[in-house]
Amino acid sequence: MNIEVGSNLYRNSDGTIEIEGVPQIQVAQHPSTGALLVNFALFDAEGRMLAKVVDSTLMFNERRAYDVSKTAQSLVLTEAASGKVVLQLDMKPPDLISFSKGEFHTMKGRLFEVSAKEWKIAKQTKSGQTVDAKGGAVSIG
């Protein structure tokens, strides 16, 4: 599976996105319907879990602070009060998952930001790179 994070392309991935060494996002396609399935853990700056998405469904939602909008081809997690996009993933033919927008804390408490042109974490920024994940996880930070 190919995953685009900002403008960076990670080819031949297993669908896992590790941020600072911790698997925080897992993407897959449903075996019979082909629908996008997303697993994601959302943390605050102190590393406490605020929300958890399992198979594109919000399973844990601290204080009902987050909303999920999904189709067979996309998932958007937003803050309920502000409407700010926390995580946006879209399937693009033939075998690409695009992570084009998002802003959330890693499990280690650092702010991770994704825009169409780059990803940023602490003082590290990457844009326009192509990386072969060789069947493993996408590693960020």
Image (tube, grey):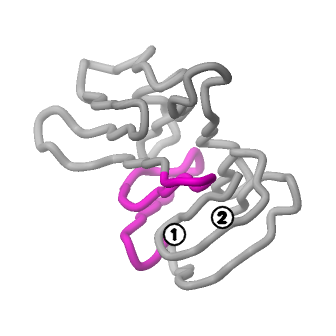
Identify the residue at horizontal 57%, vertical 45% (top origin): 107
- Mark 2 belongs to which amino acid? Ile
Rendered residue at 53%/83% (across/down): 127
Q: Of 34 and 23, which appears nearest the observer? A: 34
Q: Type of residue at label 1? A: Ile
Of the image marks 1 and 2, the number of the one nearer the N terminus: 1
From the viewer's perspective, is the residue at label 1 or at label 2 nearer?
Answer: 2
Residues at marks 1 and 2, CA–CA distance in whole angstroms: 9 Å
Q: Residue at x 39, y 40 (%)?
A: 74
Residue 8, horizontal then vertical, whole percent? 57, 74
Q: Is residue 112 magenta?
A: yes
In the rendered image, residue 25 lying in the magenta stretch gets the answer no
- Quarter holding the C terminus is bottom right
Q: Percent from the top left, x then y, of residue 92?
A: 49, 54
Front in this rendered view, residue 10 or 58:
10
> Disc 1, disc 2: CB below 8 Å?
yes
Residue position marked by numbered label 1 in the rendering: 121
Vertical comparison of 57 with 75: above or below: above
Q: Specify the farthest residue to the top.
A: 59
Q: Secondary structure at mark 2?
A: strand
Dot 2, how many residues are within 10 Å of its Cα: few (below 14), some (14-19), or many (20+)?
Answer: some
Residue on which disc 2 sits: 140
Q: In the drawing, what numbered circle is on residue 104? A: none
Please give the name of the residue rendered at 64% of the width and 55% of the height, measured from the top-left corner: 19
> Is 99 on the left-hand or right-hand side of 13?
left
Is residue 106 found left or right of 82 in the rendered image? right
Please tell me whether residue 45 is drawn above or below residue 2 in the rendered image: above
